[in-house]
Image (spheres, rainbow, N blue to C red):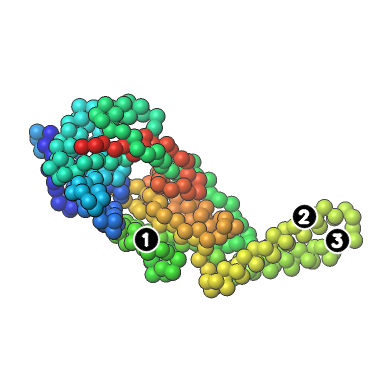
Amino acid sequence: MKLHEIDVDKFNLLMLAEPDSTIYQSSYWADYMIRDEYNPVFIEATDDLGSCVGLSMFLIKKEGFLFNRYVAYAPHGYLINYYDNDSFNQFHSQIVDYMKNKNVKKIIIEPQVSSENRLIDENLKKLGYRKSKDLNSYELLLNDHEASKLNEYGILKISSEDPETVSAFLSDEEKKMYSSLDKYGRLYVARIDSTKSKRNITDSLYYGEQFINSNKNDYKFNKRIADKEEDMNSARRYLEMIQKHENNNGEDPIIGIICTCFYSDKCSIMFKKILDDGVFEAEAKIVDQICDECFREKIRKIDSAIDFYGAKAIELLGEYTYKV
């Protein structure tokens, strides 16, 4: 096995050929992390025939101000077969030699492997890695997804939009993250359909009043009238919430944003901004739309480093640190 640096274009091409690669292991994530003074290095390992057998992007950063020593961080870990101990151990050994020449004193990796796989954990520890942090991944298998129920009072419009239309709702960090995703990023936006929502509520209140006035003197309708009054109170609360959002953000106000990345046949949720406190189920409706597009693009799983509607938490092995 031979280890060498490669340029960013070759690295990204090799990355896309790897079935388990993620946006976090690519140069696009490096573009985002540069804001924290990380410098990316792209590594390829080849066998005797020159075929690629391992890849890793390292983000290297000076550790403190007083010492000329560095930390090398591999987001989401190496792209190598962790189950092949011989190959992995060779890769590790050459990575350590390489990092010594870079004056790196600490290597940090995040293997995207379930915590149930104790054999990989044991091998990492034998090599000198030490677990330094617990990590979870959040996943939604599309075959397990159930679409959210229709809300007759809060009708939402879900669309994919340009960042300019939602700029006022995003922090500087979120804007930088989206920008770094390049062509792979998509912003899904949930807006209240003001016209349809208010019309449905107004109609519901009108017919509710008609029903109550027509049957209020008949004791047989007491229970149904009580239920109708409860529904009408709920409709009024929705109307108040719609008017509140309209007062803040105009007609068809934005109440939810989810940033996704469609990369290497995967869909990852990068960040979300939900403004409706769950009242209109904006997050659920956006996830429904993302699932629909994933089905069309033959993607069968959505993952994220953050929890999201319908996702299942997967405990990973965790973050590991190796002192060089």
Judged from the image, the secondary structure of the residue bearing numbered disc 3 is: helix
Compute the Cα span from label 2 to label 1. Answer: 47 Å
Q: Residue at x 53, y 49 (%)?
A: 147
What's the residue type where badge 3 is placed?
Asn
Q: Residue at x 29, y 29 (%)?
A: 125
Secondary structure found at label 1: helix
Element at badge 2?
Answer: helix
State if disc 1 and disc 2 touch (CB < 8 Å).
Answer: no
Q: Residue at x 40, y 29 (%)?
A: 116
x and y percentages locating residue 267 in the rendered image: 37, 49
Which quarter of the image is occupied by the C terminus? Answer: top left
Q: Residue furthest front?
A: 66
Mark carried by residue 173: 1
Rendered location of residue 251, percent (x, y): 54, 73
- Is 148 in front, or is 32? 32
Q: Nearer the viewer, mark 2 or mark 1?
A: 1
Which residue is label 2 attached to?
Answer: 227
Residue 313 lies, with reference to residue 190, above or below; the image says above
Of 129 and 235, nearer the camera is: 129
Name the residue carrying label 3.
Answer: 215
Q: Are dots 3 and 1 in contact, CB under 8 Å?
A: no
Q: The residue under label 1 is which amino acid type? A: Glu
Residue at the (29%, 40%) spot, across then down = 109
Q: Earlier in the sequence, mark 3 or mark 2?
A: 3
* Residue 22 image point, x, y percent: 31, 46
From this view, report whether residue 15 is shown above or below residue 285: above
Which of the two discs, 3 and 1, sits closer to the camera? 1
Could you say which quadrant of the image residue 174 lies in? bottom left
Residue 197 in the image: x percent, y percent?
61, 66
Q: Is residue 77 visible?
A: no
- Whichever of labels 2 and 1 marks the residue nearer the N terminus, that label is 1
**272 sits left or right of 154 in the view:** left
